[in-house]
Image (tube, rainbow, N blue to C red):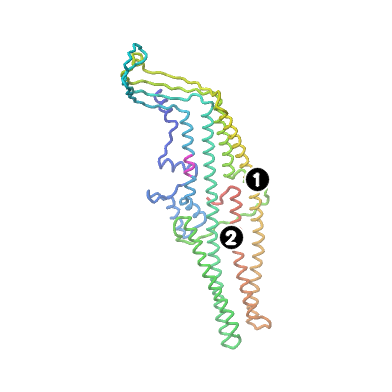
Amino acid sequence: MRRAALAALLLAGCRLYSREAIDARYVEVLDYLGRDDAESARRPSAPLWEGVEQRKALSIQDAFRITLTQSERIARAAEGYLQSLALQDQAVAAMLPTVSLQATALLQDKVTVQSSSSFFTTSSNREELRLTVTQPIFQGLRQFAGWRRSQEAIAQSRAFFDTERRLLFQVLAQSFYNAVFLDRQLAILEDALKNSRERLREMQARQTQGVARRTEVLLIETQVASDEAQLARGRLSLSIARAQVAFLVGRPLPVPLVDDLVEPEVPAELAPLVQEALAGRSDLREREAAVGAAEADLAVVSSEHQPSLDFVGNVYAWRRNFSEVQQVTDWDALFMVTLNLFSGGDIRAREVAGESQVRVARLNRDELARQIQSEVTRAFLTWRTDQDLIRTLETSRRTSEENHRQVVTEYRQGIAGVSNLEVLVAQNQALAAQLELERQKIQSKLDWFQLENVRGRIPVR
């Protein structure tokens, strides 16, 4: 039992850091599958891509889960969490004994003085093999402060990982929904070009019949050319946007992007949202952990005012050319009590600096808390306004399309005062209203995501 207890004590500071152990810890604590690694044939994104290919569509949820397996910033944040665990191990190791095996051989100039002391040797050559155990017994609570510092470091790194994941979703959402809008815009422009070409054929037929002037045909030809140029620009923009999404997910997009998220109703009250944000924001938890870390650092410095007690023990396995007493000595134990009486004000100066760091950490925390309230307020008001704008733009689209149909009908009927230019203006107004409505719908969804972001949430898993 004594041997088992000793083995447990010696291994208490050890932690498994194999690739499998790290991956398991990532999944259990961070809900992180890890990053694709081509060299080791490790691809956590493979089953995700299989589902995408089966559905023949890539949703924002699919894209986010895949992006997590590709992002270097997420992998760096996960490594930061792993490093904080190593700091905890170091804090544990500082409280555990140190055991070392030392073999020494001393060679010196021959001593001519003869001594009859049985306690000390004058031999020029001495060798020994000893086992040394060093154990800090009390360090003025320094070990406990160091342990607390390691716990705050773990909390900081955990919160930082959540923050990075949340910010990564915002980057992905912006690129994803930009591509979705440009895809919808492309469909609208293709339909508009089709209508312009049909109208050009109609005007050319009317010119042949002598009903329309040449200038009217030229006006429609100009509109067709403008629509073709706008369509070409739209295709280029869509290709660039899809390339950005492909960069985030790590491969070219083999399927279309689909928007399968439905916006919820806008909350009626602002105050609960602010409270949720203050409770849920990971970066605020990170700032709170930074305050605790600064306080722990200060405690480490303050502990130097207190006495320390250390133990050093040696077990001698073999000795040669030592004195008679030393030769038969099998072990020794040394207890040392140290009290700092005067250090030229160094400890107090470091305490003052530590106290200042604590105050700065608290100021940073309080500043972020106030900033969160402002961010939630702005995001809430913006998203609520989006709904009003969408209703207004839906009315604008409906009336502009009705106006376009009416003007075309009146022009074909030959009603006096209705010109081809008026038809063209009505057509462009309807197209602009349709595009603006689609743009606002996408912006509303992004503003919803922004409100979720400032509340410390991600709307997908």
Q: Is residue 153 magenta?
A: no
User: Circle 2 sits in a helix, a strand or a loop, which is it?
Assistant: helix
Whole-percent x, y for residue 96 in the image: 45, 28
Q: Which residue is mark 1?
A: 370
Whole-percent x, y for residue 219 in the image: 59, 80
Mark whose residue sits in front, 2 or 1: 1
Kind of residue sitting beneath label 1: Arg
Which residue occupies the extreme front position in the image?
Answer: 112
Compared with residue 170, is residue 424 higher up or lower down, i.e. above or below? below
Write the start and end of the magenta stretch as one range.
Answer: 78-83
Q: Which residue is mark 2?
A: 442
Whole-percent x, y for residue 406 in the image: 65, 76
Residue at horizontal 32 percent and vertical 18 percent from the top: 111
Horizontally, residue 413 falls left or right of residue 14, namely right
Kind of residue sitting beneath label 2: Ile
How packed is label 2: few (under 14 Cα within 10 Å), some, or many (20 or more)? some
